[in-house]
Image: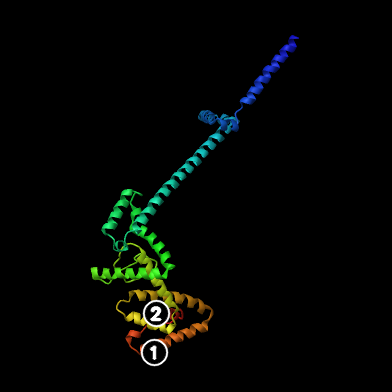
């Protein structure tokens, strides 16, 4: 009876010991629920491994490194750090988005304030109203170097908006163009020069205007659209008529605008004819003769007519020099 009792007690003790060991085993789930424990246990594991390495016991260091609890703690510690980095990055992105929204709103308000100033102030710049606007913009401290207050940047947005509006409204474009030409005359009168430049930074910058009226605005959009209309007009004009228009332009006193447009139309036409002549050599030869014969007739009229045909895109494409 005593033996049976002893065996039973021993079995119970063994069961408690084994189950206690099993249930106290620390795996990934345990450490995921107890992150502080994961950090402390991993630190202990790391310390024991380093101690073994310093003692020169590589076998023990490898055994410790292969310990299941140490591996579980290590994995969860890495997981915690990764999640922390992700959370910090998401928080930073959220802050940046919020800051950008605030900045964009301020910039929009600034642009609206600037565009509400009279066009005459924005064309000539450095007036009392533009100076006041600029100072109030600087005082907002939107960015470190004050680039948000750069009138070319803000004016550029006004240009884009004006270009779009004037493109779809011919009457408004002509009205704006008339107003801007009035400012051009005023500029000439004040400066006594013939170098007014309504569009220093526009897409169709016209060569020959040295003086820069700084800032981009409705005038730049109106002038550019007018140039584009002229470009289309000249490009669609019959060959001989376009030659005569060029001669008239070339002999005029203030010819920088029309010459620039002719130069652009030449490139546009040459590109189209080069494509055509690649597959039609006879057409190229015929165009060459046409250019040659017209120039011969023009040469008889005097020196003002010489070399005019060379400025036509068709002749350039036909290799007439």
Residue placed most toward the observer, 12 or 301: 301
Residue 67 visible in image = no
| Residue 50 percent across, percent down from the top left | 51, 30
| Residue 226 percent across, percent down from the top left | 39, 71
Distance from disc 1 to disc 2, alpha carbons, whole Å, reads 16 Å
**142 on left or right of 79:** left
Residue 299 visible in image = yes
Q: Residue at x 32, y 81 (%)?
A: 251
Q: Which residue is mark 1?
A: 297
Query: Which quadrant: the N terminus?
Result: top right
**189 on left or right of 61:** left
**225 on left or right of 126:** right
Q: Residue at x 50, y 76 (%)?
A: 275
Q: Residue at x 37, y 87 (%)?
A: 298
User: Of the numbered discs in the image, which one, if any, rests on residue 140?
Assistant: none
Residues at discs 1 and 2 in contact (Cβ within 8 Å): no
Query: Which quadrant: the C terminus?
Result: bottom left
Residue placed most toward the observer, 31 or 146: 146
| Residue 202 percent across, percent down from the top left | 37, 65
Identify the mark nearer the N-term, 1 or 2: 1
Q: Is residue 158 above or below residue 106?
A: below
Q: Which residue is mark 2?
A: 311
Q: Residue at x 37, y 53 (%)?
A: 109
Give residue 266's quadrant in the image.
bottom left
């Amino acid at each position: 009876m005593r033996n049976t009792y002893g065996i039973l007690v021993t079995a119970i003790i063994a069961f408690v010991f084994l189950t206690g060991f099993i249930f106290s085993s620390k795996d990934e789930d345990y450490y995921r629920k107890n992150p502080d424990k994961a950090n402390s246990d991993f630190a202990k594991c790391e310390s024991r491994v380093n101690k073994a390495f310093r003692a020169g016991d590589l076998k023990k260091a490898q055994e410790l490194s292969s310990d299941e609890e140490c591996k579980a703690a290590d994995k969860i510690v890495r997981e915690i750090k990764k999640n922390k980095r992700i959370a910090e990055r998401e928080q930073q992105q959220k802050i940046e988005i919020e800051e950008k929204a605030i900045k964009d709103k301020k910039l929009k308000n600034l642009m609206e304030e600037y565009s509400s100033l009279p066009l005459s102030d924005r064309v000539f710049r450095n007036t009392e109203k533009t100076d006041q606007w600029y100072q109030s913009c600087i005082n907002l401290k939107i960015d470190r170097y004050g680039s948000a207050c750069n009138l070319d940047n803000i004016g550029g947005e006004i240009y884009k908006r004006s270009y779009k509006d004037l493109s779809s409204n011919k009457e408004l474009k002509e009205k704006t163009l008339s107003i801007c030409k009035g400012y051009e005359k005023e500029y000439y009168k004040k400066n006594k020069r013939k170098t007014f430049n309504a569009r220093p930074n526009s897409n169709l910058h016209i060569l020959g205007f040295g003086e820069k009226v700084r800032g981009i605005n409705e005038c730049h959009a109106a002038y550019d659209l007018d140039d584009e209309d002229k470009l289309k007009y000249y490009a669609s004009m019959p060959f001989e008529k376009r030659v005569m228009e060029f001669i008239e332009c070339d002999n005029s006193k203030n010819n920088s605008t029309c010459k620039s447009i002719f130069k652009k139309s030449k490139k546009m036409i040459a590109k189209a004819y080069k494509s055509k002549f690649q597959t039609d050599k006879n057409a190229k030869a015929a165009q060459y003769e046409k250019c040659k014969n017209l120039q011969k007739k023009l040469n008889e009229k005097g020196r003002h007519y010489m070399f005019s045909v060379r400025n036509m895109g068709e002749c350039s494409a036909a290799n007439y020099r």
